[in-house]
Structure formats: structure tokens, C-alpha cells
Amino acid sequence: MLLADFGTSYCKILDTNQDHGPRVMASRDLEPGFMADLATGHNAARRSRRSIN
């Protein structure tokens, strides 16, 4: 499952199927079609299947 916090400048992404911790990246560097399973943040509604704020 992909969990994310989509901010306006940076995103924090955690893949619960992987053993490593979350990654932080600039929001502008995300692939155009990138979708998380569950997310929060300013851009969560358009970048995830389910958003919680």
C-alpha cells in the first residue's frame, strides 16, 4: 500500500510493502499519473484513491 502526504512543495511517500522508510521528494518531481492508495495534504484528493485531511 502506498501512503503519502502531498504538500504543495514536498511529498512524503511510504510504501508499506518495502522495508525502507519513507522518501521525501519535491512535488514537482512526481510522475504526472502517480497515485497513492491513501493520502493527506493539499494535493491528496487528486493524487490518491482515498484522501483524509
Image (cartoon, rainbow, N blue to C red):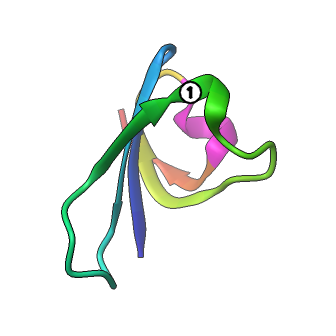
Name the residue rendered at 65%, 24% in the picture: 28
Name the residue rendered at 51%, 15% in the picture: 8
Which quarter shows the N terminus?
bottom left
Q: Is 15 positioned to the left or the right of 9 in the image?
A: left
| Quarter-of-image position of residue 21 | bottom left
Which quarter shows the C terminus?
top left
Was residue 45 drawn as part of the magenta stretch in this picture? yes
Name the residue rendered at 54%, 58% in the picture: 36
Image x and y of residue 30, in percent:
65, 40
Image x and y of residue 32, in percent:
80, 42
Image x and y of residue 44, in percent:
53, 37
Image x and y of residue 2, in percent:
44, 66
Q: What element does badge 1 sit on?
A: helix
Q: Which residue is mark 1?
A: 27
Q: Which residues are magenta?
A: 43-47
Q: Is 33 positioned to the left or the right of 15 in the image?
A: right
Q: Is 43 positioned to the left or the right of 51 in the image?
A: right
Name the residue rendered at 56%, 27% in the picture: 27
Compare residues 19 and 42 and report the one nearer the observer: 19
Count up the numbered dots: 1
Compare residues 47 and 22 and report the one nearer the observer: 22
In the image, farthest residue toward the right? 32
Rendered position, 35 above or below 18: above
Rendered position, 18 above or below 41: below
